[in-house]
Amino acid sequence: MKIGFIGAGNMATAILTGLSKTHIAKENQIFVSNRSEEKLKVLEKKHGFKTSTDNSFVLKNAKDIVFICVKPQVFNEIAQNLKKSITKDQLIVSIMAGKTIEYLEKALGTKNVVRVMPNTPSLVGAGISAISASEKVKSNKKFDMVLEIMRSCGEAEVVDEKYINAITQVSGASPAWIFMMTEALADGGVECGLTRDLAYKFAMNAVYGSGKLAVEKYKDDKTHPGVLKDMVTSPAGTTIEGVRVLEENGFRGAIIDAVLQSYSRSLEL
């Protein structure tokens, strides 16, 4: 299986790292292009991938699956040149926000398109990806390879494309907000007298452990996150006092507004 990546940013690197742990393709069957020669040298030295600053190099050699991992704005600059080189046998996988399957089919002149929305926890094998494709493409054995690749760096769910933009915010953009919350937790700890190192260690592990607990309890018996919150909030205790302050300051509303505003922006891309 010969697989290519156009773009080598954080998400491409995460997918490449997961792919290197599978038996889908050998290192010398993976081709990567990027504007930065320095970044390509790192990938070539670390994994043995074949690299180039020329996108056509990837399309010429990756005869089976090609991942497009560039920003939506960059795609508009390179789409015409990509269209000239794509073959009917190549399955094109886009991780770009906002670019629909229909748009990609027209821009690239192919019906063999898969749309994937991963998130940055994929960098540590803890990501979750939403995957969409036409029914015809889903019957292609290469689609199964895409599923395996994405599951090599976390979980993956096949979903109707109409949900992709919402999922982009709920799982794709939300890590940034969770990191902001983690930083704020640590700042609060510092104001209470903790050293910065201790504050970060305890805040980060609280976020990590809470996420793991929520995931596992939901898998086990669909336990609602609100139930887990109630488990921590003792009557007249310290936690419920903090919950009251968060509610007074519009904590939930701010998060919902962030999702909606980001969703609106994704429709503009």
Image: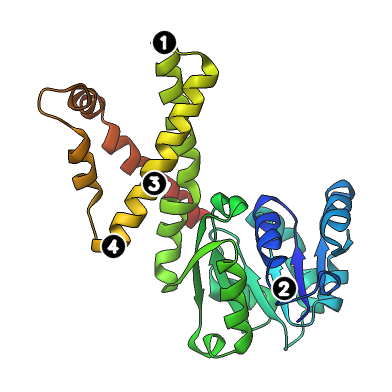
Q: Which label is found at residue 211?
A: 3
Give the labeled residue for mark 2.
66
Q: Residues within 10 Å of mark 1 (few under 14, many from 20)?
A: few
Q: Nearer the viewer, mark 2 or mark 3?
A: 3
Q: Residue at x 40, y 49 (%)?
A: 212
Corner quadrant of residue 67 = bottom right
Give the labeled residue for mark 1.
191
Counting from the top left corner in percent of width and height, residue 73 is at 66, 54
N-terminal of the pair, mark 2 or mark 3, is 2
Q: Nearer the viewer, mark 2 or mark 4?
A: 4
Counting from the top left corner in percent of width and height, residue 150 is at 58, 67
Q: Nearer the viewer, mark 1 or mark 2?
A: 1
Q: Nearer the viewer, mark 4 or mark 1?
A: 4
Q: Residues within 10 Å of mark 3 (few under 14, many from 20)?
A: few
Q: Is residue 69 visible?
A: no
Give the distance between the C-alpha atoms of the residues marked 4 and 1, in whole angstroms. 38 Å
Q: Nearer the viewer, residue 157 or 115?
A: 157
Q: Amino acid at mark 2?
A: Val
Position of the C terminus, as image quadrant, is bottom right
Give the distance between the C-alpha atoms of the residues marked 2 and 4, in whole angstroms. 36 Å
N-terminal of the pair, mark 1 or mark 2, is 2
Q: Which label is found at residue 220?
A: 4
Residues at discs 4 and 1 in contact (Cβ within 8 Å): no
Q: Nearer the viewer, residue 116 or 241?
A: 241
Give the distance between the C-alpha atoms of the residues marked 1 and 2, in whole angstroms. 49 Å
Horizontal placement of 43 versus 203: left or right? Answer: right
Q: Residue at x 84, y 64 (%)?
A: 49
Vertical position of residue 219 compared to residue 133: above or below: above
Q: Residue at x 52, y 54 (%)?
A: 126
N-terminal of the pair, mark 3 or mark 1, is 1
Q: What secondary structure is marked by label 3?
A: helix
Counting from the top left corner in percent of width and height, residue 118 is at 54, 59
